């Protein structure tokens, strides 16, 4: 090989920014040198030994065959650049390696510079384009300065590509988070923060599936504020809204984290109680009833009080949400007829 690389060229630092932090604090640029000629490794080290880019030193990793290079690439994910010889264990070992990196490993970020001692074996132009080869150089024609310039240009490209990749990843994460937020919002009653009807249906389907699998029972409580229209008519809707929010907060505070509360009408609510029996559910309904009746809701029109009527039902074998709501509604109607502000269990209804 006739004077492959001129190691006596000027040492260049390709960074206009003043060095503010000591270089060793920043991680090095990992550069893989693949060549079956020991002398090429030695000269490359010599040329790059004092070079930095963006205050980061170079860390050279040597491979003497395409096969060895492949093992390194597969285990070292943050290689910025590979300087690849063309002719090694085979005449096309270097080209096969870059094809493998792009096509099989799907590594689009590592920059690739090809160096050949046999310039007659230049790859076709489409190979250079398709495999994103940054430079193709004849070893006889590489001065230290040319090599360093090509390496710095490649590192700039690598920096740009990885920055774009991380921005994309960040953007995708933000879009995913926002989508989740919107989906959540679409499931909530904006006034009270309780679930809406759609959320109830989804949640019920999940709870029913779970209860059928575990043979656990599932109870439904339905409740309705007594004379709510009167509150709206007397004090106005803003006060009615305050009452609804207070009622939801009061009920939620008495529920287990696994229970679920939804607002399905103006002043109508459904509670799902997984793994609860009728007695337990009636006890919870009774506690919520008492807590609502004890509320003294402060509004700019004075203290407002409210009561609610409850119907409780154990989901039957068919586990049908709408049928269960209809039965809970019938029990609730009985509570209303019986004087309101009370809890009735659906099983107390006379058989139809
Ligand atoms: Mg070779």
Image (spheres, helix red, strand yellow):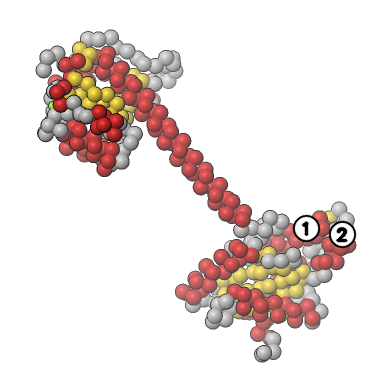
Q: Position of residue 323 (x, y in %)?
A: 62, 78
Location of residue 216 in the rendering, given as x and y in whole percent from the top left corner? 52, 76
SS assignment at label 2: helix
Residue 198, above or below 328: above
Q: Is residue 217 above or below residue 258?
A: below
Under 8 Å from ligand 1: the CB of mark 2? no
Which residue corresponds to the image point at 61% horizontal and 70% vertical from the top-left?
A: 272
Are the residues flagged by discs 2 and 1 in contact, CB closer than 8 Å? Answer: no
Q: Quadrant of ligand 1?
A: top left
Using a 10 Å C-alpha cutoff, classify the residue at mark 2 as few (fewer than 14 neighbours), some (14 to 19) or many (20 or more): some
Q: Report the quarter where the N terminus lies.
A: top left
Residue at image point 81% right, 55% down:
238
Q: Image check: 203 left or right of 148?
A: right
Q: Nearer the viewer, residue 218 or 330?
A: 330
What secondary structure is marked by label 1? helix
| Residue 154 in the image: above or below residue 346 | above
In the rendered image, which quarter is residue 270 located in?
Answer: bottom right
Q: Nearer the viewer, residue 211 or 132?
A: 132
In the image, taking residue 189 as reference, residue 27 lies left or right, namely left
Q: State whether residue 72 appears in this view.
A: no
Q: Which residue is at the far bottom?
A: 351
User: Under 8 Å from ligand 1: the CB of mark 1?
Assistant: no
Reply above or below: 333 against 248: below
Q: Position of residue 214 (x, y in %)?
A: 47, 74
In the image, 225 versus 189, the foreground residue is 189
Real-space CA distance between mark 2 and mark 1, rounded to the nearest whole angstrom: 11 Å
Which residue is pictured at 64% across the width and 58% down the height? Answer: 188
Residue receiving disc 1 = 241
> Can residue 200 be seen from the camera position used here?
yes
- Numbered tag placed on residue 235 in the rendering: 2
Quadrant in which the C terminus appears: bottom right
2 or 1: tag closer to the N-terminus: 2
């Amino acid at each position: 090989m006739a004077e492959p690389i001129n190691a006596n060229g000027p040492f260049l630092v390709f960074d206009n920014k003043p060095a503010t932090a000591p270089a060793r604090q920043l991680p090095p640029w990992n550069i893989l040198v693949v060549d079956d000629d020991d002398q090429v490794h030695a000269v490359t080290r010599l040329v790059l030994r004092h070079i930095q880019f963006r205050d980061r030193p170079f860390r050279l990793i040597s491979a003497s065959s395409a096969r060895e290079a492949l093992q390194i690439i597969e285990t070292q994910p943050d290689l910025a650049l590979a300087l690849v010889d063309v002719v090694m264990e085979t005449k096309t070992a270097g080209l096969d390696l870059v094809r493998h990196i792009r096509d099989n490993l799907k590594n689009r970020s590592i920059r690739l510079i090809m160096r050949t001692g046999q310039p007659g074996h230049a790859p076709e132009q489409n190979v250079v384009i398709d495999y994103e080869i940054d430079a193709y150089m004849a070893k006889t024609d590489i001065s230290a300065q040319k090599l360093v310039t090509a390496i710095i240009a490649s590192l700039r490209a690598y920096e740009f590509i990885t920055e774009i990749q991380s921005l994309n990843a960040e953007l995708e994460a933000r879009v995913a988070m926002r989508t989740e937020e919107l989906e959540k919002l679409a499931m909530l009653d904006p006034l009270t923060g309780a679930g809406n009807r759609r959320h109830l249906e989804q949640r019920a389907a999940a709870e029913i599936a779970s209860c059928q699998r575990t043979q656990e029972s599932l109870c439904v409580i339905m409740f309705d504020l007594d004379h709510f229209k009167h509150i709206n008519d007397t004090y106005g809707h803003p006060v009615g809204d305050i009452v609804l929010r207070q009622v939801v907060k009061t009920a939620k505070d008495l529920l287990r984290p696994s229970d679920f509360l939804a607002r399905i009408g103006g002043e109508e609510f459904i509670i799902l109680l997984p793994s609860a029996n009728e007695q337990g559910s009636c006890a919870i309904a009774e506690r919520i009833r008492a807590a609502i009746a004890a509320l003294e809701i402060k509004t700019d029109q004075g203290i407002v009080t409210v009561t609610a009527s409850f119907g409780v039902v154990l989901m039957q074998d068919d586990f049908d949400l709408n049928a269960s709501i209809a039965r809970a509604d019938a029990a609730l109607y009985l509570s209303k007829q019986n004087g309101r502000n009370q809890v009735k269990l659906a099983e107390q209804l006379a058989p139809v």
